[in-house]
């Protein structure tokens, strides 16, 4: 059975139990969006009760959990304690060894909304939704084809042509190169290092920014025994599969002349061909198959455009394929015409017996009502007025009767 390497979900307990049972080898991560949402709801009382709570949160990495729990009176059955017990599912130090492609949220709401933005809304009927869905898919395919065309027919403008950066610009896609370029800029402008150990085959450095205490710097290990190998304690390559600024800094200092091939993954390349795979079914050819075929056809034309002989060979193959398809279509049309004539003769007597009637009455349609809106979270729901003095509902401290009574007692 195939197990996915990673799954990102919300903090649903039933879903977590199912993942542990069905995918025992899969790393389960909590969505950071849901954690931030619950954080705002559950930590509000700590922020209002302790003035230094917000500032102390930034220093939790240096504070033991017991010290913080005692100082802020964290109970064993509260949300904050539960999150600490489940830290392997959301804390970055526990998730550095698994590839997440830079994703920290499920992307469920934002990705679906952006995909259908401009095509459907709450008033879209079901029959219209099918048409609009096809248009949305076609628009996404067209955008991907346009990006593929730009990647294949353009090259990034390099201000400082270093061999490592030049190779990345040659092989990476446009989006991946933009990410690489940010890391490279940081590596050559804002980093320094301290040497920990150094031998002829392996060296270890502490790399970080000049304005940051070196105890927070990352540990980079560079090995050149058989081939160039580099690892960093920030684990950006393990989680995003692109080299971090600390690794690039060490490679530049060690005079590495090009980006090692093992750090350029095939699916991040701009010249990779899209495979059709087993994406068709018995009923016909899928839209994804057409997209893959069209994309690969465009790429082979671009690769052969510099050779007239290759273009001529490609044209000969296409003409042969066109003739084969024309013959196939002609034979199919003759066969369909014969079958339709036989079916038409057998169905003549059935026509008078077919009646289409109107429904007996109005029928309630299924699905989302036209005037329906999404369910709002507790953060968006209207809050009841709460008195900060007596903690009562329905009034504020300015109109609290207990406040006025206490003030009158003080005056007397």
Image (cartoon, helix red, strand yellow):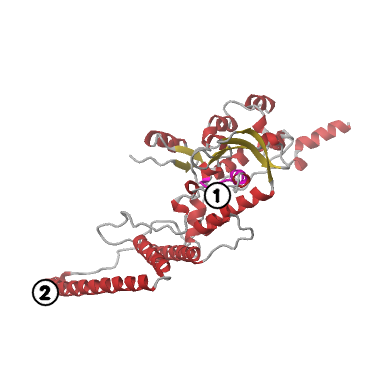
- Residue 223: where, in percent of width, then height? 54, 38
Instruction: Identify the residue at the far front of this view.
Output: 200
Number of numbered tags placed on the structure image = 2
Q: Residue at x 52, y 58 (%)?
A: 170
- Residue 230: where, in percent of width, then height? 54, 40
Quick check: can you spot residue 243? Answer: yes
Q: Seen in the image, is 75 located left or right of residue 15?
A: right
Disc number placed over residue 376 in the picture, else none: 1
What is the span of residues highlighted in magenta in the rendered image? 240-250
Which one is nearer the viewer's eye here, 75 or 135?
A: 135
Quick check: can you spot residue 179? Answer: no
Image height of 211 relative to 65, above or below:
below
Which one is nearer the viewer's eye here, 314 or 404?
A: 314
**First-in-chain label (2 vs 1):** 2
- Residue 55: where, in percent of width, then height? 72, 37
Disc number placed over residue 345 in the picture, else none: 2
- Residue 340: where, in percent of width, then height? 16, 73
Q: Residue at x 58, y 33 (%)?
A: 79
Q: Would residue 398 be counted in the magenta stretch? A: no
Q: Would residue 242 be counted in the magenta stretch? A: yes
Q: Seen in the image, is 320 located left or right of residue 16?
A: left
Q: Residue at x 53, y 55 (%)?
A: 167
Of labels 2 and 1, the one closer to you: 2
Please tell me in which quadrant of the rendered image residue 42 appears: top right
On-image quarter of the N terminus: top left
Q: Most prominent secondary structure in the magenta stretch?
A: helix
Q: Secondary structure at mark 1?
A: loop
| CA–CA distance in space, label 2 to label 1 | 60 Å
């Amino acid at each position: 059975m195939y197990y996915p390497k990673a799954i990102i979900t919300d903090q649903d307990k039933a879903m977590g139990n199912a993942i542990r049972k069905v995918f025992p080898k899969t790393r389960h991560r909590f969505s950071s969006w849901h954690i931030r949402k619950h954080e705002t709801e559950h930590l509000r009382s700590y922020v209002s009760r302790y003035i230094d709570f917000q500032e102390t949160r930034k220093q939790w990495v240096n504070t033991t959990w017991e010290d913080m729990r005692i100082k802020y009176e964290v109970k064993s059955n509260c949300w904050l304690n539960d999150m600490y017990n489940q830290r392997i599912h959301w804390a970055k130090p526990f998730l550095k060894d698994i590839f997440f492609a830079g994703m920290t949220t499920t992307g469920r709401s934002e990705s679906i909304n952006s995909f259908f933005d401009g095509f459907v809304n709450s008033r879209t009927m079901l029959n219209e939704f099918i048409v609009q869905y096809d248009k949305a898919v076609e628009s996404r395919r067209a955008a991907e084809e346009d990006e593929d065309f730009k990647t294949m027919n353009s090259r990034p403008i390099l201000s400082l042509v270093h061999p490592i950066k030049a190779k990345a610009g040659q092989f990476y896609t446009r989006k991946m190169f933009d990410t690489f370029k940010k890391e490279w800029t940081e590596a050559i402008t804002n980093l320094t290092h301290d040497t920990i150990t150094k031998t002829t085959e392996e060296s270890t450095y502490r790399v970080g920014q000049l304005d940051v205490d070196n105890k927070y710097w990352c540990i980079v290990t560079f090995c050149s025994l058989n081939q160039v190998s580099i690892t960093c304690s920030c684990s950006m390559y393990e989680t995003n599969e692109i080299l971090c600024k600390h690794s690039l800094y060490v490679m530049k200092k060690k005079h590495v002349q090009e980006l090692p091939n093992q750090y350029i993954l095939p699916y991040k390349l701009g010249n990779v061909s899209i495979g059709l795979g087993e994406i068709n079914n018995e009923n016909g050819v899928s839209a994804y198959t057409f997209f893959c075929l069209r994309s690969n056809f465009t790429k082979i034309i671009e690769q052969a455009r510099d050779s007239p002989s290759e273009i001529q060979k490609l044209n000969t193959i296409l003409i042969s394929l066109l003739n084969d398809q024309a013959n196939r279509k002609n034979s199919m049309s003759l066969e369909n015409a014969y079958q339709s004539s036989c079916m038409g003769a057998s169905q003549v007597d059935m026509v008078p017996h077919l009646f289409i009637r109107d429904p007996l009455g109005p029928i309630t349609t299924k699905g989302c009502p036209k005037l329906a809106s999404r369910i709002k979270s507790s953060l968006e729901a209207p809050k009841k007025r709460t008195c900060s003095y007596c903690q009562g509902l329905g009034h504020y401290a300015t109109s609290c009767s207990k406040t006025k009574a206490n003030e009158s007692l003080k005056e007397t």
